[in-house]
Structure formats: C-alpha cells, structure tokens
Amino acid sequence: MSKGGGGGGVQETTSTVTQTNLPEYAEPYITRLMQRAETESLVPYTTYEGQRLATFSPEQELAMTGKAGLAVAGDPTQIAPASDVITNLAMNQMMTPEGTMVPAIGSGQGVARSTYNQVTGTDAAGNPVYGNVQAYMNPYQQAVTDMAKEAAREQSLRQSNLIAQDAAASGGLGGYREAIMQSERENALTKQIADIQAVGSLEAYDQGRSAFEADRAARFAGIGTDQATRAQQLGAAGALADLGFNRQAAEIARLDQLGQAGTARQAMQQQVYDTGYQEFQDQLAFPRQNISFFQQALRGMPITPGQQVSSYQPTPSAASTMLGLGLGGLGIYQALGGMGN
C-alpha cells in the first residue's frame, strides 16, 4: 500500500515466506533412507579375493607337451629307413635278403646285348679267342672227339699194315702201287680226322650255344626277379613311410582327444569360478538393491508435504510514525471543521 502527493511519497513492501515440511510419520523413513544411501556411497572398493580364471587342466598340459615333443622330434622314425631304401634303389642298389647292398642288374640291356661266340681277344699266334665259347662248351666233348680221332688213326694204321702185307705178298713192297695206296689212306685219314673234329666241334658249339641261351634266359628271369624285388622294396618303403605318418597322425588324434577332455574340465572349473564371482557381485549389490527397493516403496506412499505461509511487513520508523500521527490529526481537525469555525 502506498500513498503520495506532490513531489513524492513513501512505498511500503510486504514479504511472504512459504515453508514445506514432510509429514511427521514419513520424516524418519526418508531420513534413514538418505543416511543409508550416504553410508553405502562411502563404502570403499572391495577387491575379489577368489580366483577368476581356470588354469590349464592336467590333460591339456599333457596334450600340449606331447604335441611339442612331436614337433621337436620331426619326421616319424620310419621315414629315414624308407628314404634310404628309395635312395639306394634310385642309385641302382638292391638289398639282399641278408641285408647287404649289391648292384642291381638294372634294365637288362647288358644281357640283351650279349651274344654267343663273342671275341674277347687273341692268342699268341694272333688267332681270335672266343671268351664265352669255352665258358659254355662241354669240357668233355673234345675228349670224346679226340677218342674218335684216335680210333680213326688206329683203323688207318691197320689198313696201312694190310696194304704193306699185300704188297709184300705180291712182291711190290715199296713199289709205286703201295705208295699210291698209302697216300690215299693217309689222305682219307686226314679227311676223316678233320670230319671227326668238325662234327665234334659242331656238337660242342651247339651244346655251348644251348647252354648260352639257357644262361641268358636264366639271367633275364633273374632280371625279372630283380625288378620284382625292387618293386617290392619300393612298395615296402612307401608302406613304411605311410606307417610312420599314420602312426604320427594317430598320436596327434589321441593328444587332441586328451586336450578336448582337458578343455571340458577347464570349462567346468571356469563355471565354478564364475559362479563364485557372481555371488560376490550379488553380495556387493544386495545393500544397494535394498535401498532402491526402500526408495521405490516410499515413492509409492501418498506422502503430501505440508506448507506454512508467513507474511512480513517492515516496522515503521519514528519519523514515519510522527508523520502519520500528524497527518491523522490534521485529518481529524479538518473533519471537525477546524477549532474555531
């Protein structure tokens, strides 16, 4: 309220204060809620003392150690002997049943090129020497031929004696007729001995050639046997190498199975650790969950804060009081029409 005139006046101001108060029945609960929240907020960080991660299981350790051992060991032990067999075969070497290495016959070209009656040199007189003729001829054949020639000489000697006896009986011993007959006999003997030697040599040659052909056939058969043996050894070497790799693969498979069993055990142990850690987290969160629950419960209650409104006016000063009194008296005086009127 204000009043003024002329050059100014005095303005009065009124202040209003509104106070909001919790209901008496709700105030203790809300106070305790705030205290609990403050206490919980001051709790220091809590370290989890349990184990968080599961270590490798014994099965996993064995599996990893086993695989590391296989890696360090290198190729299977069967690879080295298999490689040696293949290398020896490539170098035209063959292993005998006794275990010794000997040169293999090979493709058989040397046997195929060999021919009967091959000249291997010359004798002192310059005559050719057939190296393989004597090797294949029957050593007793010449003895039989020599016996036939000796028999022919003996027969010729008897004929010579008969010619001499006839010549002596006829008085022509030492004559021209006897000489002709003896010459014809000697010529016949020479031809007969030559024929006997030729027949004997031919038989010996045929026998030697047959022996050579049989020997070459046997050698070719040996080549076939040799090639079959080489093929068997090559196959055995491959099978030995495969055995080594298959055995190594089987060992790796067993180690993998062992590792899988260890992984399953590790996973189960990890679940145990995770459960313990989750329980620890639940324990830490339990007081805060209760505070939140309490807060939600209070929010659901019909709590209406009370209000108190207070108005304040400023206290008048002495001057304003006196002025008011003066103005009031003046008004009364004027209302009464003045003292003298």
Image (tube, grey):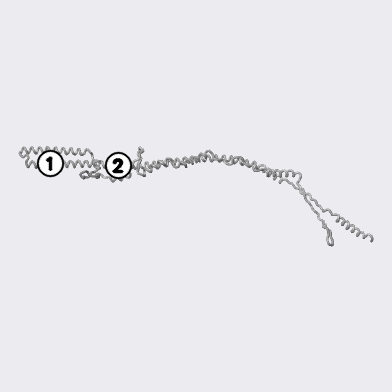
In the image: residue 196, left or right of residue 270: left
Q: What amino acid type should be assigned to the residue bearing mark 2?
A: Arg
- Quarter-of-image position of residue 318: bottom right
Residue at image point 14% right, 38% down:
153
* The C terminus, quarter of image: bottom right
Q: Quadrant of residue 338 in the image?
A: bottom right
In the orientation shown, which residue stands out farthest toward the left?
Answer: 171
Badge 1 density bin: few <14, some 14–19, many ≥20, Cα 10 Å? some
Q: How far apart are marks 2 and 1 (CA)?
A: 48 Å
Query: Which of pointers 2 and 1 indicates the residue nearer the eye?
Result: 1
Q: Position of residue 229 (x, y in %)?
A: 35, 41
Q: Identify residue for label 2.
A: 219
Q: In this view, does 328 lie above or below 262?
A: below
State which tag comes first along the sequence, 2 or 1.
Answer: 1
Q: Name the residue under label 1.
A: 186
Give residue 9's position: percent from left, percent from top.
Answer: 83, 59
Quadrant into which the N terminus falls: bottom right
Residue at image location 18% in from the left, 38% down from the top? 146
Q: Residue 157: x and y, percent?
A: 12, 38
> What amino acid is at disc 1?
Glu
